[in-house]
Image (cartoon, rainbow, N blue to C red):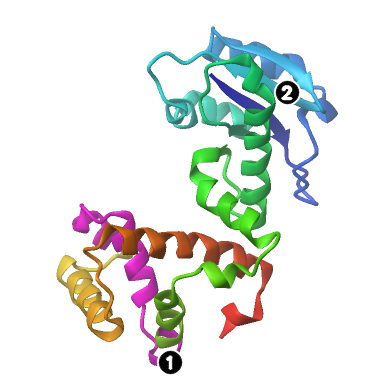
Amino acid sequence: MALIPYYSRDPETNDCWITALVYGKVQLVAQHMIQLLPDSRWIVYQGRIVFLISLVDSSCKIIAEDKRFLEFLQVNGLTASLSNCFSHLTFLRKYYKQCLTAVEIDFQLNSNKPVYMYEDYLCEHIGKIISEQNDLADFCHPVIQKLIAYDNGHKTSLLPTLEAYLQYVDTPNLAAKTLFIHRNTLFYRINRIRELFEVDLSDGDIRLKLQMTLHFLKLKTQRGDPEDQR
């Protein structure tokens, strides 16, 4: 099951709390969604239209990638947020909060996507919780800051190269494609990173720490931390 609170975006202020209720679209949204997802149930809660959807051996990603669903959101000026799947109604509040968290973080990152999936923002959520009582920089891998400084000083692109490599570690061709570079260029840059910063990218724990730092960096950059502007 998944929760989907709908939002209608104010074209002038980009306010995420302007809901579909303002435009009188509740019945339209509900009726159309039931056609797309016959097993869904819906309510209006805290000014948002919330859908409870039954998923059997499936992933919320199927909903997020449904072309009819995406087209409906776009035509009606709506966005949707999906929680992780859950199995008991007593968990409703927790998973509803996941939806709100995904929206909040996405608006902070200013990516303006039509559908927010909480699972895509898990690392940023961890960073957000940490930053409420700690300096997020204390939890970042030092290699990332060194990479930023090196790129700034040498006009290189090692950091985005590392990010793409970590995302597609088993498919280097895809990593190279996202960077619009040749596969050999990708390998050359990765080897340079290994040599310059003495980092073992074959170590899964190190790759995890680097990826977490990259997610944390997105939050820090959006907040305009002076340290990130160096």
Overall secondary structure of the magenta stretch?
A: helix
**Residue 96, quarter of the rendered image:** top right
Q: Which mark is residue 153?
A: 1
Q: On screen, 27 above or below 110?
A: above
Within 10 Å of disc 1 (Cα), the crowding (few <14, some 14-19, many 20+) is few
Residue most extreme to the right: 22
Q: Which residues are magenta?
A: 151-178
Position of the C terminus by quadrant: bottom right
Q: Which residue appears at 79% of the width and 23% of the height? A: 45
What amino acid is labelled 1 in the image?
A: Gly
Q: Is residue 168 left or right of residue 10?
A: left
- Element at badge 1? helix
Amino acid under disc 2: Ile
The answer, for residue 79, to whether it is visible in the render is: no
Question: What residue is shown at x 32% (from left), y 69% (from top)?
Answer: 161
Q: Is residue 133 left or right of residue 73?
A: right
> In 3D space, how far apart are the residues under numbered discs 1 and 2 (Cα atoms)?
49 Å
- x%, y% of residue 12? 79, 51
Q: Where residue 49 is drawn, which disc sits there?
A: 2
* Residue ranking furthest to the top: 38
Q: Residue 160's quadrant in the figure?
A: bottom left
Q: Nearer the viewer, residue 119 or 49?
A: 119
